[in-house]
Image (tube, grey):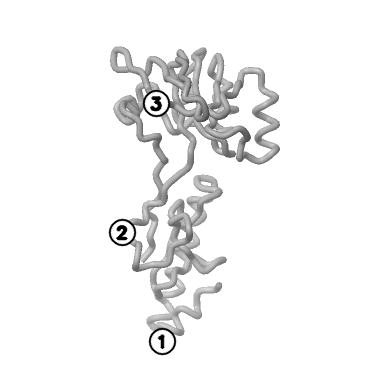
Amino acid sequence: MILATGSGYRKLGLPKEEELSGRGVSWCATCDGFFFRDRDIVVVGGGDTAMEEATFLTRFARSVTVVHRRSTLRASQVMQNRAFADNKISFAFDSEIAEIKEADGKLAGVVLRDVFTGKTRDLGVTGLFIAIGYNPRTKLLAGQLELDDAGYLKVLSPSTRTNIPGVFGAGDVVDRTYRQAITAAGGCAAALDAERYLAALADGSTETACAAVPV
């Protein structure tokens, strides 16, 4: 069995967030950035993904405001430098999205709240990109297979074997770093490991089959 249940985007949990998905709210700049040409956009997050999204969106947007709830970014220094050097990108530190505004069924702006003072201010944007991480889809596996501290499926690297013989993992449910860049390769690796396991199982015991998959 190969498990490739993937992961889902983390959400802010605000009213209208899901309702306006595809109508101003997005979790994927490479998917939707083109639709926001010459618009003012907000990107929420402080990690590498958020910096990548913000930098990519400057190809289309008039301006990009990065909203982060802390005073410093978590992104790598290289990604920070790239974002800070872009004159289309500005930053709202120690801030969070308090409200998503709607007009005529589309995003019409957001309300920012200072996490220390509680003061709010309106930001007139028509694009909101949320980049605050992912949640692996492993709830159905809890208690049956080993998961790491973030809930991702643990495999016996460099193989795709899990702690249960004959069960393999692939894709975003295993990898929290490279994601789409290696998803196809991860699936191929799991298929090869499963093939080795089944071939060895036909000729011997479960122990022999497990030994046939390199770790």
Q: 39 and 124: which one is in front?
A: 124
Q: 168 and 142: which one is in front?
A: 142
Q: 203 and 137: which one is in front?
A: 137
- Residue beneath disc 2: 140
Three-letter amino acid code at disc 2? Answer: Leu
Q: Which is in the foreground here, disc 1 or disc 3?
A: 3
> Quick one: label 1, few (<14), some, or many (20+) residues within 10 Å?
few
Q: Which is in the foreground here, disc 1 or disc 2?
A: 2
Residue in the image at 63% along x and 35% along y: 72
Compared to 154, does 40 lie above or below? above
Distance from Cα at disc 1 to Cα at disc 2: 31 Å
Residue in the image at 52% along x and 69% along y: 156
Distance from Cα at disc 1 to Cα at disc 3: 54 Å
Three-letter amino acid code at disc 1? Answer: Gly
In the image, taking residue 82 as reference, residue 154 lies left or right, namely: left
Distance from Cα at disc 3 to Cα at disc 2: 29 Å
Q: Earlier in the sequence, mark 1 or mark 3?
A: 3
Q: Quadrant of residue 27?
A: top left
Q: Contact (CB < 8 A) between labels 1 and 2?
A: no
Compared to 87, does 83 lie above or below? below
Three-letter amino acid code at disc 3? Answer: Val
Q: Quadrant of residue 65?
A: top right
- Residue beneath disc 3: 25
- List x then y, in percent, for residue 114: 50, 25
Count the labels in the image: 3
Say which mark, if any, is on residue 204: 1
